[in-house]
Image (tube, grey):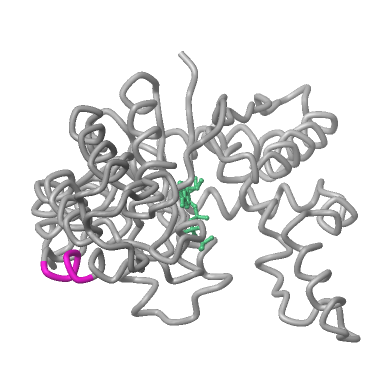
């Protein structure tokens, strides 16, 4: 069987766009494959410098995935920071990686382009070595688990190619003793649905236009009410397809609940307020039961820690075995 590996960013509580675009499909895949999920907390360190926030984000993201249905018996879930072999391997991989390859990495180049566009003279301003080395650490995340398939978004194509390049460089030198399997990326097929945020742009944490998955009920209601709508009177016909609340409703409600709403909007007779109430009800029904589980898991207590510790132990069986072979191959045994 093939091993699937996915890294999850630990950047705050996921929003309902992440749920549709990432969590739901990933959980469907996890139930059908041999999967490992890790919380990429060391990757977050490049951007998050507030220890309490980082700590909370890690718990919140782990609790979200578990509350949404990740089964820790089936899927190995662990924190990247619990696997020392990742960092050891990262150093070994750095020694076979050309600096020029890192110079061409998209995230690094984008940071330089931004500095150039802003007229700066130091194009590396604001770039830390963590960002520069990111592709090597990601290669270590993948290779240390000998993952075969890495389901990721299309923005990650380069990182997967780099992992292959780095693995091949290692294999070329040491392949007689040990060779990494070359992982494949698995990219979403067709057009992914992109949820609009409350201001109509793509829902995104960076735009601060997002609806977090597990808001308390009263806050969820208030946020849904805040979605801007025009002043078309209740009785006037409306275009559902340009309406944010309707587009969101269509993602979460079954067709038999969406179609009557579409009809009433098109014919006139349904106001935006009523539409938003309907959206709130649907979101609350979708996420309410999961929210209870989420609240239980994020509360201080041992359950979440115990799940992550057990996951890390299982993951380390793999990483230790890989590192033993790698160390022998390079001569540091
Ligand atoms: P940031 O603003 O920090 O980039 P984000 O809120 O845009 O964060 P990402 O962390 O970039 O979210 O994305 C995580 C995953 O969620 C990706 O797989 C992405 O495709 C998916 N995703 C993000 N936003 C949406 C959205 N609005 N609709 C559908 N899927 C989304």
Whether residue 198 sits left or right of residue 127 in the image: it is: left
Which quadrant of the view contains residue 47?
bottom right
Q: Of residues 19 and 330, which is closer to you in this image?
A: 19
Q: Position of residue 19 (x, y in %)?
A: 35, 46
Looking at this view, is 326 or 30 the one in front?
30
Q: Quadrant of residue 165?
A: top right
Of residue 286 and residue 314, the one placed in the foreground of this image is 286
Residues 217 and 131: in front is 217
The residue at the far top in this view is: 1
Q: Residue 191: percent from the left, percent from the top? A: 55, 32
Magenta range is: 218-222
Residue at 71% across, 49% down: 92
Q: Residue at x 51, y 69 (%)?
A: 206
Quadrant of the snapshot with the C terminus: top right
Q: Is residue 230 magenta?
A: no
Q: Is residue 205 left or right of residue 181?
A: left
Q: Residue at x 69, y 51 (%)?
A: 136
| Residue at 57 percent of width and 26 percent of height | 190
Q: Could you tell me if residue 305 is visible in this image?
A: no
- Is any part of residue 103 visible from this angle? yes
């Amino acid at each position: 069987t093939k091993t699937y590996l996915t890294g999850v960013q630990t950047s705050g509580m996921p929003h309902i766009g992440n749920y549709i675009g990432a969590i739901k499909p990933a959980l469907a895949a996890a139930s059908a494959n041999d999967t490992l999920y890790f919380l990429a907390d060391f990757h977050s360190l490049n951007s998050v410098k507030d220890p309490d926030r980082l700590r909370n984000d890690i718990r919140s993201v782990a609790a979200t995935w578990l509350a949404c249905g990740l089964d820790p018996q089936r899927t190995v879930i662990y924190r990247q920071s619990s696997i020392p072999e990742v960092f050891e391997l990262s150093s070994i991989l750095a020694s076979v990686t050309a600096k020029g390859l890192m110079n061409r990495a998209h995230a690094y180049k984008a940071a330089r382009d931004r500095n150039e566009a802003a007229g700066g003279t130091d194009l590396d301003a604001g770039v830390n070595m963590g960002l520069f080395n990111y592709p090597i650490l990601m290669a270590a995340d993948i290779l240390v688990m000998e993952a075969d398939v890495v389901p990721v978004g299309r923005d990650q194509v380069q990182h997967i190619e780099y992992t292959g390049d780095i693995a091949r460089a290692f294999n070329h030198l040491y392949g007689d003793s040990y060779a990494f399997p070359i992982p494949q990326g698995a990219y979403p097929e067709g057009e992914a649905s992109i949820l609009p945020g409350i201001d109509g742009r793509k829902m995104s944490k960076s735009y601060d236009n997002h609806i977090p998955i597990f808001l308390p009920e009263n806050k969820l209601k208030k946020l849904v009410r805040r979605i801007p709508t025009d002043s078309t009177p209740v009785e006037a016909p409306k275009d559902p397809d340009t309406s944010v609340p309707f587009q969101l409703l269509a993602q979460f409600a079954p067709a038999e609940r969406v179609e009557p709403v579409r009809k009433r909007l098109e014919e006139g007779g349904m106001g935006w307020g009523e539409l938003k109430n309907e959206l709130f009800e649907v979101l609350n029904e979708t996420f309410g039961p999961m929210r209870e589980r989420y609240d239980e898991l994020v509360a201080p207590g041992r359950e979440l820690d115990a799940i992550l510790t057990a996951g890390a132990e299982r993951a380390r069986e793999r990483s230790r075995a890989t590192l033993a072979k790698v160390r022998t191959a390079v001569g540091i045994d």
